[in-house]
Image (cartoon, helix red, strand yellow):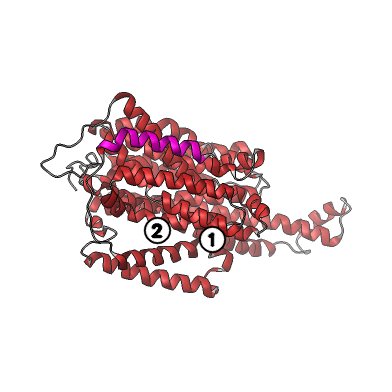
Amino acid sequence: MAATPDNTAPLKPLHGAPLVLLTIAVAFSTFMEVLDMTIVNVAVPHISGALGVSASEGTWTISSYSLASAIMQPLTGFVARRFGEVRTFVVSVMLFVLFSMLCGMATSMPMLVFARLMQGAGSGPMVALSLTLLLSSYPKERQGIALALWAMTVVVAPIFGPILGGWITDNLSWPWIFYINLPVGVLAAIITWTLLHKRETKTYKTPIDVVGLVLLVAGVGCLQFMLDNGNDHDWFNSTLILALGIIALVCLTFLVVWEIHAKHPVIDLTLFKQRNFTVGVISLSLGMFAFFGINVVFPLWLQTTLGYTATWAGLASAPVGVLAFLLSPIIGRNMQKFDLRMLVSFAFIIFAITSYWFSTFDSGASFATLVVPRFVMGLAIPCFFIPLNQIYLSGLPASEIASASGLSNFFRTLGSSVSTAVTVTLWQHRGIYHHATLTEYVSPDAPATSQYLQQLSHLHMSASQRLGYIDQIVSREGLTLAVNDVFFLCAVLFVLLIPVLWFSRPPFGSAGGAAGH
């Protein structure tokens, strides 16, 4: 997105083959970066075994990447202004590829964690700048398509991550989940640089806000680490988690105050003065909180409670991407014909209905029964992400798109991290509560219990085996009731977000244009 002086003519959009090539390159690099957030999840047991560490230590491969990526995302605007958007994007892609290779070659856990940290830091600006470069290269009337293609890759990649990761780990070996980034990343970098190096944005040599940078790294780093590891350490009963929480709170509070008054802030918080940006980011963050919570708890419930394998849990989750993939270009092409608030409201209604639908399932639900609401949920995804991106970018000048995109991506990532921490903890705690409640109905005096124990005795089970078997059933039903609670709460949150969204106001003109705000 060219931040050119007023007396310089803006660059003409790309057309034809160069535009198609650029779209493919940028879309694949974005897909690859977002994919790496979830592709490792199913490979953690294999990685832990290969490097001789425990499964809990293996999860550092996930948290180190998300931690570094979360720190770099809000810095996107600052880095892009200093070095140029095209140069920053291409270097980001190449760093991502380089550290992906180091991840695959890692022979110890410290080496792998370091490589994942650097991979996350290098790739931090990629997603935000991919949107910025697409918008600057598309004609105004077709920017909806650019938004649609970008949103499609960002949404579909995390869904296919576990499936692809599981298949690669089972059929090749875990380093290949990192090696596959090499050809995609190198081609994306070459194509992007070839097409856009003459369209580099104007750079500004502003002083580095050291205080803001330190507060950002410390605050976001501690917050992300706390969210990733809180559940394993029993949250604030752990001195470590409590200390991280206090440091994060203090640093982020001071960061906001400092950045508001800094002459050259490292994060542009003045963006929140724009009503549409504020409303759009709040709706996106909380919408992602509910959406991501469902996507985390659903496969966990399938694997830990219903006995699904990682591959089958992935296949049960995947149908959500079908309609999202098919409808995204259509929504993008026709977006200007609708009130964007109506589209997002429709998405929230579909999310709420399907979430409530999930909350009615019991432990006997078949694979086919579970797949249907996942498929229907896909209808909402393009109506959620694409219009919301247009809403929060509407009316912003070209020079602020990179900052706005980076900051909104940070809050989207943060919403996902908080969602994982909260929904998994809530699910486990509600599971314990329901287990205790159901146990009250299991006593030798209850006719149903005595009858069931009688039936089990015909299977030549000892008394302890019979009680153990009943406890397994109670645990399964308790965790199923708990997952119903989580889905129901997500449905309520989606409904509550609808009025929030209507605080935004039209016109929702093309990003980087002079639309009202």
Residue that badge 2 annotates: 71
**Figure quadrant of residue 467:** bottom right
Magenta segment, principal secondary structure? helix
In the foreground, 346 or 129: 129
Q: Which quadrant is the N terminus positioned in?
A: top left
* Image spot of residue 515 (x, y percent): 18, 42
Q: Nearer the viewer, residue 514 or 128?
A: 128
The answer to whether 5 appears left or right of 386 in the picture is left
- Which residues are the magenta region? 181-198
Residue 329's spot in the image, x, y percent?
A: 37, 31
Residue 426: mark: 1
Between residues 108 and 351, which one lies in front from this camera angle? Answer: 108
* Total marks in image: 2
Residue 197, how many percent across, how many down?
29, 37
Q: Is residue 427 visible?
A: no
- The x and y percentages for residue 182 are 50, 39
Q: Earlier in the sequence, mark 1 or mark 2?
A: 2
Could you tell me which residue is drawn at 61 percent across and 60 percent down? 56
Left or right of 298? Residue 401 is: left
**Who's the residue at 27% across and 31% down the image?**
142
